[in-house]
Amino acid sequence: MSLLVVEKVDVFYKDAQALRQVSLRVEEGELVSIVGANGVGKSTLLKAISGLLHPKGGRILFSGCAIEGMAPHQIVKMGLIQIPEARRLFPFMTVQENLELGSYNHRARKGAKQMLEMVFEILPLLRERKGQLVRSLSGGEQQMLAIGRGLMARPRLLMLDEPSLGLAPLVVNELFALLARIQAEGVTILLVEQDVRRALKAADRGYVLERGEVMMEGKGQQLLDDPAIKVAYLGM
Amino acid sequence: MKWKRIFYPDLYIALSLSGVASVAALFVRNEFFTNLVIWTFFYASLGLSWNLIGGFAGQLSLGHAAFYGLGAYTSALLFLHFQISPWIGMLAGGAVAVLFALIIGFPCFRLRGPFFTLSTIASAEVLRILAIYFKDLTGGSVGIQVNVSPSLAHFVFESRIPYLFIAWGILLGVLLLSLLVERSWLGSSLIALREDPDAAEALGINTTWVKMVALMISAFFTALAGVFYTQFVHFIEPYSEFSLENSIQFAMIPMVGGMGTSIGPVIGSFILTPLQELIRAWLGGRFLGLHWVAYGLVLILVVIFMPQGLVGFLRARRICLPEGWRRLFLPLAPARVGREMDRLIPPSPVSSSAQEEILLECKGVTKDFGGLVALSGVDLKIRRGEIFGLIGPNGAGKTTLFNLIAGFHRLSSGSIYFGGQEISGLRPPHQVCRRGIARTFQVVKPFGHMSVLENVMVGAFCREKDPRIAEEEALKIIAFTGLEDHATLPAHCLTIADRKRLEFARALATKPDLLLLDEVVAGLNRVEAEQVEEMIRSIRARGITVFLIEHVMQSVMSLSDRIAILHHGEKIMEGRPAEVACDPKVIQAYLGEEYVLACS
Amino acid sequence: MASVLGQLILNGVLLGGIYSLISIGLTLIFGVTRIVNFAHGEFLMLAMYITFWLNSLQGIDPYLSFVVVVPLLFVAGLVAHRLVIHPILGAPSYMQIFITVGLSVMLQNLALFLWKADFRSVDSFCSSSTVKIVALLCGAPKLIAFAASALTTAALHLFLKKTYLGKAIRAVVQDREAAQLMGIDIHRIYLLTFGLGCACVGVAGTLMAPIYTVFPTVGVYFVLTAFVVVVLGGLGSLPGAFLGGLVIGVVESLAGFFVSPQLKEAIYFLIFLAVLLVRPSGLFGQIGAEELG
């Protein structure tokens, strides 16, 4: 049984159809990347999975359980965690407070202290800055904090929405190294990215979205080599 | 002409209702009943006045008692000290109220929603306190008694009947005014700014000034009613004039009847006033306050179940009806206009000499939002008659550039020239529109409760104040953009493709030289996208320069004469579509590092 | 002169403590739900009346009636939120304004109908005692009110800072969607915050009953002051509401003496208008909050 199944989902955003009959699946332990040009609906897809938007048609199953229509906090409780686009950290709180809020949901709350230690171990720069307000961190540090916050929630499936946005290439390298490490710890990852090359290189499997529909699907390396991708992006 | 039909049926309903009531009062000759009719007309007038700013413009004032009291006190004091007839006092009171509106309007209109409301409450409260304080002038909390012999000049009468006719006259006057405003460019502007202030500004409406005008008119007539009250009741004091309860009452009448319509406040008063008087007569003495409990409950229930008021509720039933039915009920029905585009708007392509002219120039445009640099040193030149595309990844700064050109943000540094003249920092946006730059928004902003025709007319009003001409212009544009089947449909019934078309049509109606299109094709399927592309080519053939932002590469590539790419706020390349698509920097920006593309 | 000034300032500070307490509930509710509750003053009035009736019918000293009033107001807040506020959470601002105004009118007049317009007063064991601080005098009830107000504010502040729930509330204020992604049930937070805001007002009511007369429209006066404080301190900011309250208290006290007792309200309404114009986000508020609605 796949960890996440999205089946023929239609999502409307402000009366416009953002997603059309989108289907995908994520197996446990995989890293799946979703790529596509801007505005094709990648963020909308993650929002629909997380319960921030409700699909008008289709089903979403997490660990066999139907979650379309559920409230976001219930989905989080099941271990389906999203690190949203542009991080969305709590600006007037410290690094530590942001991390602590990450384990707000009851499943994660019990082992919160240990989790915090583990996150500090994986991301030592957060330990150094734990008392600082979020605003004083750089873009790369904020992204690390956002991921740390996501880890605090004890994710079974971790979804990331364009984590490399606005980051320098070197930092993006670190980011992907971190993702590989997280995957190695047994967390399944669903990655939405603009940086196509890196996203597909790191992925076990990938999907290409265009105009709200799944255009291509396959193994990461396969897609990377496929010339059709350039058409999808550059319209030629 | 169509406009002759504008007064049907609102005016006729109001005339019949008030006519029947007046005649009934004359026959019944019961003082309580006559009083009731007078109060109904009175509150209807107040509701109509409030509705101008609260209903049409959507600015919820709970401080109208300020104007009411100013009218009452001005007239009473002028009479008391200078024996000036209250008829003149009415005008004087109105003038004082208008002045006060001018003073508090500018500051208060800078706030929106509940904060605007709070500021109006505070203003009225200040007046109330001052009225009590300056007791030498106003009599303080004791108030002023108007004891004078009945006569026309004194505006005091023995019998109630003359008051009835005066109240009726005031009601009809304010109603007529309300209907005229509703159908004019002023009404159109007010409703537009209520629905979406940014879109209204982008269509050339000076929202601050328009709100001020509405407030001043509203203040004037509210003050008039205040004077009537003085002469009818013969006694005024600060609480009964300036209280918050008054303000709430003036607002409740249109709220229940239907805000934003001319007939709504009339109906509201015909329902609420008798209700109030009856409850007060029945319960009043023994159960003090109970009628207000009922009032409060009514307000809550109306908000939850019928937020558009009674008239709005009834009108909503007629929405999305087939064309034939709609024509029967809605006041404006357009004539059939054919699709002969060439006859409507003859092609006038830009001459080759004119094409050399640089219409829009950006020099070193930079914008930073307190640490986040959205745009950095962007240089662009757009020639007259071009279709110029702007592309780039998410967050590259494209919409920010549009916002800077259109006057929604201030430049941090750099300059923008349009037609040779500097427009950098030209604000608010309506000024930019008037210069000849129109824009659409990435997330479309239709004026939901207005029909398609009315929406496009808002744009047309930018150039034409006469409603008849504006309507003709709007109809031409509607036919041109293929919306004529939906002309009388309320905008919120449209599909997304039609809404984008509407946004387009509205911007076109302002007769721009330069049209800024923000992602007009996104979200459309291939067929719809091609129709829009066709429209864009057509308008270029009519001499309008197009600057478009787009993600859908097929559209950008096929439409644009030249393209520029933004990435991280900087322009990384500019050139013809074929050049740009093969450029390694572009590929890197979109697809990531080292992505080699073999171009033919 | 110095002692007069000192006395005025002391009075102002003590008064300000009370204003702070009323305003804290308002600012908390706004920060979380983004709704301006025009009926806030009526909850204060309710608290004062309950205190009065407990005192007059059962002889309970107002300072003891805390234990009854505060939980009752908390529950009243929960009920009011569920019935009146919850339906209009995403609604356009005119609906929010009208519905809370409607609630305000209803409650005021319900009180008028049930309990008549007579002014009531509540006596406590220390109503007439005075306390001497250095060279200045103040009434005991006022001092107790200030102390309790400061304590409540501190307690609330600690709650928001240290507990999971408190942090969740702050998270919702700062980024509603991100809070949802943390697994925070925002509707429960709205409900709880409303109840908490009303409970704060409950504390204020009990403290104020021995100092002010109780009558049905007492809430109207104080709610306008509360709005002034909240705007001055910054919407959604707890320290802002506390400091704002003190400032307004002192201004009122000084204005009452140096200008005129009747004009003191006018003075701070003018301050209100000035703040709305010059710095609508207030001393500590988040910029842009006032644009909402």
Image: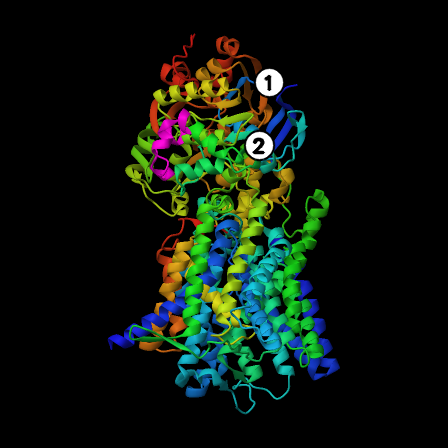
Q: Chief secondary structure of the magenta span?
A: helix
Whether residue B77 is in magenta: the answer is no
Name the residue that disc number 2 marks: A50
Mark 2 or 1: the one toward you: 1
Q: Residue furthest bottom?
A: B149
Quarter that holds the C terminus of chain B: top left
User: Residue B279, percent across and down?
Assistant: 70, 74
- Where disc 2 sits, the SS reads helix
C250 and C131: which is toward the camera: C131
The image's mark for residue B508 is none
The image's mark for residue A27 is 1
Please, is residue B81 above or below residue B258 in the view?
below
- Where disc 1 sits, the SS reads loop
Disc 1: CA contacts within 10 A as few (<14), some (14-19) or many (>=20): some
B583 and C252: which is toward the camera: C252
Disc 2: CA contacts within 10 A as few (<14), some (14-19) or many (>=20): many
Which colour style is shown? rainbow
**Which residues lie in the magenta part?**
A120-144
Image side of residue A51 versus residue B508, left or right: right
Q: Residue furthest left?
A: C1
| Quadrant of res B492 | top right
Of mark 2 and mark 1, the one earlier in the sequence is 1
Q: Which kind of residue does numbered mark 2 sit on?
A: Ser
User: Residue A99, percent across and down?
Assistant: 45, 35
Q: Which kind of residue does numbered mark 1 sit on?
A: Glu
Could you tell me which chain the residue with mark 1 belongs to?
Answer: A
**Spatial distance from mark 2 to mark 1, Cα to Cα?**
17 Å
Could you tell me which chain the residue with mark 2 belongs to?
Answer: A
What residue sits 33% from the left and 31% below the top? B358
Please, is residue B394 above or below residue B28 in the view?
above
